[in-house]
Image (tube, rainbow, N blue to C red):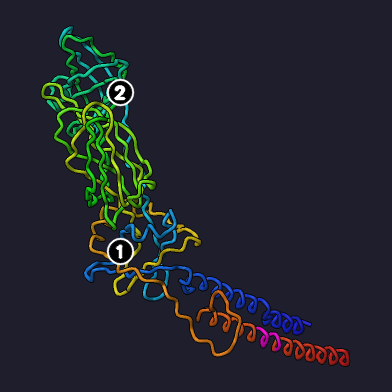
């Protein structure tokens, strides 16, 4: 009987079902894991393509392509239809920078620990940042109205010594047709813990000080760069006191973020409206900003605001209107700043790359640039010499068909066919093992029956 049990257990160890199932599962895993990764990119729905020219000396790593208006104007609004294909026919992961990111740092409140008023002269205010914090500006909060005051700024780390930071600051609150409230003072960067403000009141009533805030320096913005500006129209209207300027930002441009102007006019307060348009036609202008610009003077102190910030938008033409506030202001020059939109990808030497775009129906790029933003300045510097080739229509060459067949949306790749072949081989292997097991099972049963018959006869 023990021999029968031994033969039976040896048969169980030869059972092939578990091995066959494992083989099939492994083949299916390989088949479906390789499929999406190595699938060929079907570019038939992308209308345009450009070659990417990378300098030969550039090392491997993350680089960025500047997406100028020639590309972005033909993309979906979020530029999510941009794709990069390498010379191996593989899609490359892409991260698109967002031009609408707010790079301004909010001010923080400082502690006012002393206010001393000297009648007929000035008001001294001592504030504590609560630490050696780097700052580049101060905002004075006050309920007072209709004033223009000079301000001196000093700094200290020990409450005893004081060092001059700025002596010609100017704050103001002025009513009228163009009201103005300018309570921010910029100053050279410093990390003094204590700041002393002296507001020169003269023979006027002291201001009612409610708060003081300190402004950290604005972070560096490596994506911003100046735009080429060509003035097309610069017209003054003496009757209304207005100035109208139309400028062309050029065919190749970036999303507009800042607009400024220069003038020799010594003092003024004006309302400003900024419009943008893709063409110079009067009915295409879109207002993108409205506010106040000014230049104030009191003795040797000057405060001015000649630049405005707008939400990033791509326009070929801009229109500036200065209005109200008395006589016209003669504008001498227009300055504009744009922000680059980068398509960031990991470059490998020895491979060529193409940029595909213009497919509004496709899904947006789902990658995020957060992982590379910490090295953005390095990426911008390394990518300065990367250029896009001329735009080409994306022509997809179809393989010749030797017999009529139903056209499929995607063609099986080599790896899918190889996977199917492997699956077929696995199934054949499993089937052959099952046949062998069946034959073995019959042989074992025959031997068992003979053993039992022999023992019966012996008994």
Q: Which residues are magenta?
A: 430-435
Give the camera-side residue of 352 and 49.
Answer: 49
> On the image, which quarter does residue 206 sit in?
top left
Q: Which mark is residue 163?
A: none
Q: Nearer the viewer, mark 2 or mark 1?
A: 2
C-alpha span from label 2 to label 1: 56 Å
Q: Residues within 10 Å of mark 2 (few under 14, many from 20)?
A: few
Q: Residues within 10 Å of mark 1 (few under 14, many from 20)?
A: few
Q: Is residue 152 above or below residue 70?
A: above
Q: Secondary structure at mark 2?
A: loop
Please, is residue 281 above or below residue 58 in the view?
Answer: above
- Residue 132 in view, yes or no: no
Give yes or no for residue 434 being in the magenta stretch: yes
- When asked about the image quadrant of residue 179, the answer is top left
Q: Camera-side residue: 232 or 379?
A: 232
**Whether label 2 touches label 1, CB < 8 Å:** no
On the image, the x and y values in percent for residue 439 come to 73, 90
Residue at position x 20%, y 33% from top? Answer: 329
- Which quadrant is the C terminus positioned in? bottom right
Q: Position of residue 274 (x, y in %)?
A: 32, 40
| Rendered view: 145 above or below 395 | above
> Taking 328 as reference, is 142 left or right?
right
451 w.r.t. 330: above or below: below
Q: Residue at x 27, y 47 (%)?
A: 221
Give the percent coordinates (x, y) of residue 193: 22, 27
Give the residue displayed 29% in from the left and 55% down from the top. Answer: 253
Q: For mark 2, what is the residue?
A: 177
Q: Nearer the viewer, residue 128 or 208?
A: 208
Q: Which residue is mark 1?
A: 61
User: How many marks do you count on the picture?
Assistant: 2
Q: Residue at x 32, y 16 (%)?
A: 143
Q: Earlier in the sequence, mark 2 or mark 1?
A: 1
């Amino acid at each position: 009987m023990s021999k029968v049990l031994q033969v039976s257990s040896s048969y169980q160890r030869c059972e092939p079902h578990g091995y066959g199932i494992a083989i099939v599962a492994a083949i299916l895993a390989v088949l479906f894991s390789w499929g999406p990764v190595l699938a060929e990119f079907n570019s038939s729905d992308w209308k345009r393509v450009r070659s990417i020219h990378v300098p030969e000396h550039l090392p491997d790593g993350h680089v960025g392509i500047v997406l100028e208006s020639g590309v972005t104007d033909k993309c979906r609004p979020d530029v999510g239809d941009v794709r990069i294909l390498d010379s191996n026919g593989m899609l490359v992961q892409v991260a698109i920078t967002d031009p609408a990111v707010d790079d301004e740092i909010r001010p923080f409140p400082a502690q006012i620990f002393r206010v001393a008023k000297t009648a007929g002269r000035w008001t001294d205010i001592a504030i504590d940042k609560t630490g050696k914090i780097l700052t580049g500006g101060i905002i004075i909060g006050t309920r007072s109205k209709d004033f223009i005051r000079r301000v001196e700024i000093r700094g200290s780390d020990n409450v005893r010594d004081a060092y001059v930071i700025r002596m010609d600051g100017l704050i103001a609150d002025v009513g009228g047709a163009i009201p103005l409230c300018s309570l921010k003072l910029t100053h050279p960067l410093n990390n003094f813990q204590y700041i002393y403000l002296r507001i020169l009141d003269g023979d006027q009533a002291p201001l009612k000080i409610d708060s003081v805030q300190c402004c950290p320096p604005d972070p560096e913005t490596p994506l911003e760069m100046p735009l080429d500006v060509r003035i097309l129209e610069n017209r003054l209207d003496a009757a209304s006191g207005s100035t109208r300027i139309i400028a062309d930002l050029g065919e190749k441009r970036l999303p507009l973020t800042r607009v400024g102007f220069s003038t020799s006019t010594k003092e003024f307060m004006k309302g400003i409206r900024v419009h943008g348009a893709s063409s110079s036609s009067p009915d295409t202008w879109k207002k993108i900003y409205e506010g106040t610009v000014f230049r104030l003077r009191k003795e040797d102190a000057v405060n001015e605001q000649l630049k405005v910030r707008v939400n990033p938008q791509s326009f070929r033409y801009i229109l500036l209107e200065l209005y109200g506030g008395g006589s016209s202001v003669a504008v001498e020059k227009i300055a504009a700043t744009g922000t680059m939109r980068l398509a960031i990808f990991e470059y490998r030497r020895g491979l060529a790359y193409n940029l595909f775009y213009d497919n509004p129906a496709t899904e947006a790029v789902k990658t995020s640039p957060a992982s590379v933003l910490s090295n953005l300045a390095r990426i911008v510097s390394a990518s300065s010499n990367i250029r896009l080739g001329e735009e080409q229509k994306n022509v997809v060459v179809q393989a010749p068909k030797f017999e009529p067949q139903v056209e499929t949306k995607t063609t099986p790749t080599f790896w899918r066919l190889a996977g199917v072949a492997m699956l077929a081989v696995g199934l054949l292997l499993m089937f052959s093992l099952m046949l062998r097991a069946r034959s073995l099972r019959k042989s074992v049963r025959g031997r068992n029956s003979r053993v039992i018959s022999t023992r019966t006869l012996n008994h």
